[in-house]
Each structure stands twice: as structure tokens, then as C-alpha cells.
Image (spheres, rainbow, N blue to C red):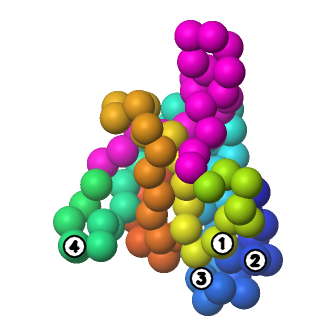
Amino acid sequence: MKTREELINLGLDGYKADEVMLLQEKMLEGAVAFQYKKKDGSVRNAVGTLFQEIMKLADGTIWAPKGAEKPADPKWFKYFDCDAQGWRQFSVFELLAVEGR
């Protein structure tokens, strides 16, 4: 999990670091709508989660992302996309909005 200090050390300002932290906290509790800018410059509206109950497979195991055993790069935010039913990631610098903010 990311920490505010880690995000600020990457170069995020305090507001953006707080937004990333808010998204992370909300995703640990359930599905959250949010927006980010994709690499091609377009805006992605997403609904994602880090809440394990939502990511359970039929046999009860948790759907883990590829490379989950590697240390996470703090510049990237990995999340489970509820619409696509798969893992995605985006740059923490490109977060635009979090639902309810």
C-alpha cells in the first residue's frame, strides 16, 4: 500500500497525494468511480476496487494481478476494474477525480 510520504517523495503535491490516498482507502472498502488520464491523453472513467470480497473467484480464491509477488512501483496504481473484470494500472500523476470528492 502507498503512503502519503512516499507519494510526496515521488513529486506529487500534497493535494494530489491526498487524492491518491483517498482513492486507495475507498477502494479497500468497495467499488469506487474515478477518472484518470491515459497514456494517449484520453480520459478514462473507471470503477475499481481493492476490496477482496469483490475480487473472489467462484472457487473462493482471490484474483491477484500478474507480478503480485514483485515489489510495487509507487508511481503506478494497480486496481481491479469492476467493468472489465481484470487488473489495470495508471500513473499516480494522472489521477483526475475521485467520486464523492
| Secondary element at tag 3 | loop
Contact check, label 2 and label 3, Cβ < 8 Å = no
Cα–Cα span, label 4 and label 1: 21 Å
Question: Which contiguous range is marked in magenta?
Answer: 45-66
Total numbered badges shown on the rendered structure: 4
List the residue tagged with mark 4.
40
Q: What residue type is labelled 2?
A: Glu
Q: Which of marks 1 and 3 is nearer the N terminus?
A: 3
Cα–Cα span, label 2 and label 4: 26 Å
Q: Which mark is residue 6?
A: 2
Numbered disc in front, either 1 or 3? 1
Residue drawn at 47 percent across, 70 percent down: 91
Pointer 2 local density, CA inside 10 Å: few below 14, some 14–19, many at least 20: few
Vertical order, 43 against 16 (above or below): above
Q: Which of marks 4 and 3 is nearer the N terminus?
A: 3
Q: What residue type is labelled 3?
A: Leu
List the residue tagged with mark 1.
74
Is 54 colored magenta in this rendering? yes
Q: Residue 12 carries which label?
A: 3
**Would you say residue 100 is visible in this rendering?**
no
